[in-house]
Amino acid sequence: MLSLDPFVYAGTDGRATPGLVERWTWETDTRVRLRLRPNVVFHDGTALNAALAATLLRAGVTSQENRALTPALEDIASIEPDGPLDLVLTLVRPSALLLEDLALFMAKDTNIGTGPYRVVPTDNPLELRLERFDQHHRGTPTVAAVVIRPFDTLRTAWSSLLRGEVDVVSNVPADAVEFIRNDDVQVISYSRRYQFVIAFNTGRPALRPAAVRRALNLAIDRGSLTSRVLQAGGTPSTGPVWPGFWAYDDAVQPYTFDPQQAIALLDSAGYRLPREGTGGRAPARLRFTCLLPENFSVYERLALEVQKNLLDIGVDMQIEPVSDQEFLARMATRDFDAIFNDMISGPTPERPYIFWRSARRFRGPYNVFGYENPEVERLFDVLRTSRNDAAVRSATRRLQEAMLNDPPAIFLAWNSRARAIRRDFIIPEGEGDPLNSLWKWTAAPPARVADAR
């Protein structure tokens, strides 16, 4: 973020905005011309030109890690320089999400980027030091140097912040915001493109009917969940599409908290509450187990709230905390009923695309839930290929509706993150994560003390 620049930025509305690529022109449906910014220099003094950018971009688009998160990169057939600053990309098919997928950070070599700060050696293996790069193409950073240090506990980091030994604590839990904020410390929150989700393995017979999954969504009191657990550090969610996406339709009505309707749906699907339990357990109309990455207190508290809501309609969700390694291994082999996770879902429809496409047509490391819906599949195809705004708006609205009718998960809440920063700095407003604009922070004027005489 501080030492590398991307080819383009993915805006909060899901549209591409200029980065190292200054502008672009679609010459045909399968050919796009990119114009690089002039006078961009790497930290080692190398000038950025089209030939070097083509080499670096080819490496970026062939990376399996990048392709797993941004499948539109697979649509690129060739990348060729055309003159000193132009790149021409030829595609195998029309690709509406391609430009947003070019939000790839570019490095000429390890730690040699074009960003506002360059990494410099340090004798401390637990410390990362960055110094400003005076030739940065967006201007010379106002903050001269940044030192990043780990702390064993948040409490230790907060104490250091309050004593003025550090200037920023990068991640403040919602329930600690009021404890941290004071006359010397400001807390700046921003919305993340992630949401807390309980995703189902729809290959499990009990979780296969769409009516069952609708009922489980209707049982969740999202307003209470976000206020009690997230301390207003999040907003309720009932679907996979990022609400900040430019084509998102606010008129589509989300789930309401309606436990009686949930019970009626389960009854009609044949999941009636038995009079007696089995194996020493209380009666339940449905039981399933939810995997939970261990040692994440917010995850645990959210999962417990969901568990209580589901118990009120006679559904027994057992919570199984496991190590990160076991969590990933069992997810990859589909050895689960459901999983709790903090899932990236924005800013474009391609984020839900990598989780909820039909595995019969699209195989990827994240597409492990067995979700199959022909209408959802058709709409994802429209969103991947159409650059017509009206068609994208229509497909987005219908995708929201289709995934409310046949939800692959319990979508709980979009979450936010808070940065605690000493008031010694003035932070530019309206730029999302304040660390993105760190290179533009300025020193706050000294506090003026009134003369009471």
Image: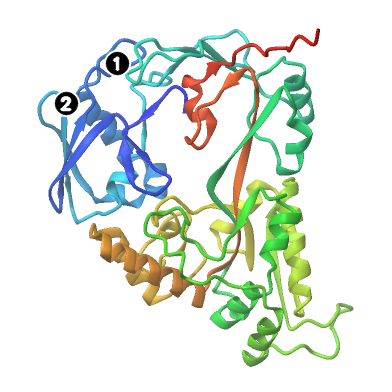
Q: Position of residue 4 (x, y in %)?
A: 41, 25
**Of all residues shown, which one is farthest toward the front?**
453
Q: How many marks?
A: 2
Residue sitting nearer the eye, 426 or 193: 426
Kindly indicate the quadrant of the structure image that contains residue 163. top right
Query: What amino acid is found at the position of numbered circle 2 in the picture?
Result: Leu
Pick out the residue farthest to the right.
280
Q: Position of residue 412 (x, y in %)?
A: 62, 61
Q: Is residue 403 left or right of residue 217?
A: left
The image shows residue 25, relative to residue 133, as above or below, that is: below
Apparent side of residue 279 relative to residue 421 in the rendered image (left or right) = right
Q: Are marks 1 and 2 in contact (CB under 8 Å)?
A: no
Q: Residue at x 64, y 75 (%)?
A: 218
- Residue drawn at 85 percent across, 84 percent down: 277
Instruction: Judge by depth and name the residue closer to the eye, 137 or 315.
Output: 137
User: Quick check: can you spot residue 294?
Assistant: no
Write down the residue under mark 1. 41
Instruction: Kindly state the secondary structure of the residue where label 2 is placed.
Output: loop
Q: Quadrant of the C terminus?
A: top right
Q: Position of residue 328 (x, y in %)?
A: 59, 51
What is the quadrant of residue 425 in the picture?
A: top right
- Where residue 315 sits in the image (x, y, percent)? 74, 77
Q: Nearer the viewer, residue 143 or 381?
A: 143
- According to the picture, the residue beneath numbered tag 2 turns out to be 85
Choose between 80 and 241: the one closer to the eye: 241
Name the secondary structure under disc 1: loop
Answer whether residue 35 is visible to the viewer in this image.
yes
What amino acid is at disc 1?
Val
